[in-house]
C-alpha cells in the first residue's frame, strides 16, 4: 500500500488536511513515526516534535508487548497482566524502558522538553498501530499535559484497534484498515528499522525550518 514512510506520511497529511489552519501540533512516536509525522506536519504547516513512548516487551518475546510507558511516566498495561506477571519483573522492564526514553530525549530531542501542548490539538503519529500500547501511553501523556484535544493518526491499523483508538482519542485518522492485518510491515514495500541518525536528520530539518517550533514565517507565506 505504501512505497515507504515518506509516501505514507504524505498520504496521511492529505487525510489530515481538515486540521490545516487550526492550532495543532504533530507529535511523532520515534523512531518509525518520525518521517511519517514530519511529512504530515509539512502538509499541515504546523509545529512538529517527538513524543517518546516505549513498549514494555515480554521477557521471552521482545517483539510482543504487555504495555507501554511514556516520557511523563504515563503507563498502560494489558488488562490482567498484573495477575499473570510478577510485579518485580514488570517494574524491571519498565525501568529499562524509562532509561531508554531518557536516552532518546537526550539524543533525538537534544534534551529539550516536550513542547507546551496546553490547550492545543495534538496529532499523535506513528508509522502504524499494531496492538496500540505506545499510542495509548502517548494519549495519556498528552491528556496529563493539558492538551485541548488528541487526534490519533496513522497510515495503517486493524479494525479492532481503530475502534479502540476511537474510544480514547477525540478523533482518529487512519489511511488504510486492511481486512487481514497482522503487522505494520506488511503495508510497506521498503520496510526497515529506523536508526537514530535518520530521526536526528529529520529534527535538524525541523530546526532549520522552524527554529522556535513555530509555523512558517510571515515572509514564507503566500
Image (cartoon, helix red, strand yellow):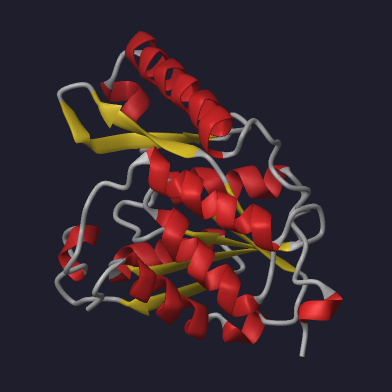
Q: Is residue 79 visible?
A: no
216 versus 54 height, above or below? below
Q: What is the quadrant of the C terminus in the image?
A: bottom right
70 or 179: nearer the viewer? 70
Residue 108 % position (x, y): 52, 38
105 versus 178 height, above or below? above
Q: Quadrant of residue 127?
A: bottom left
From this viewpoint, which residue is outermost toward the bottom?
222
106 or 57: nearer the viewer? 106
Count of marks, rendered view: 0
Q: What is the quadrant of the N terminus in the image?
A: bottom left
219 versus 165 height, above or below? below
22 or 199: nearer the viewer? 199
Residue 4 % position (x, y): 28, 68
Q: Is 157 placed left or right of 101 in the picture?
A: left
Residue at 66% across, 80% down: 19
Residue 205 % position (x, y): 57, 57
79 versus 157 height, above or below? above
Residue 179 % position (x, y): 18, 77
Q: Is 45 placed left or right of 3 in the picture?
A: right
Q: Is residue 60 visible?
A: yes
Residue at 28% across, 19% down: 85
Residue at 31% across, 34% down: 66
Q: Quadrant of residue 121?
A: bottom right
Q: Quadrant of residue 221?
A: bottom right
From this viewpoint, which residue is outermost toward the right?
218
Amino acid at each position: 500500500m505504501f512505497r515507504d514512510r515518506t509516501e505514507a506520511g504524505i498520504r496521511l497529511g492529505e487525510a489530515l488536511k481538515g486540521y490545516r489552519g487550526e492550532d495543532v501540533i504533530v507529535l511523532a512516536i520515534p523512531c518509525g513515526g518520525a518521517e511519517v509525522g514530519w511529512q504530515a506536519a509539512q502538509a499541515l504547516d504546523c509545529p512538529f516534535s517527538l513524543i517518546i513512548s516505549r513498549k514494555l516487551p515480554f521477557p521471552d518475546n521482545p517483539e510482543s508487548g504487555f504495555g507501554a510507558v511514556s516520557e511523563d511516566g504515563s503507563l498502560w498495561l494489558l488488562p490482567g497482566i498484573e495477575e499473570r506477571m510478577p510485579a518485580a519483573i514488570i517494574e524491571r522492564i519498565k525501568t529499562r524502558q524509562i532509561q531508554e526514553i531518557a536516552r532518546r530525549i537526550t539524543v533525538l530531542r537534544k534534551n529539550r522538553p516536550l513542547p507546551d501542548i496546553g490547550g492545543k490539538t495534538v496529532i499523535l503519529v506513528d508509522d502504524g498501530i499494531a496492538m496500540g500500547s505506545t499510542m495509548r501511553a502517548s494519549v495519556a501523556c498528552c491528556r496529563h499535559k493539558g492538551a485541548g484535544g488528541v487526534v490519533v493518526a496513522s497510515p495503517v491499523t486493524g479494525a479492532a484497534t481503530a475502534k479502540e483508538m476511537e474510544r480514547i482519542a477525540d478523533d482518529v485518522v487512519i489511511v488504510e484498515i486492511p481486512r487481514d492485518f497482522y503487522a505494520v510491515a506488511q503495508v510497506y514495500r521498503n520496510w526497515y528499522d529506523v536508526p537514530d541518525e535518520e530521526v536526528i536528520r529529520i529534527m535538524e530539518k525541523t530546526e532549520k525550518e522552524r527554529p522556535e517550533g513555530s509555523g512558517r514565517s510571515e515572509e514564507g507565506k503566500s
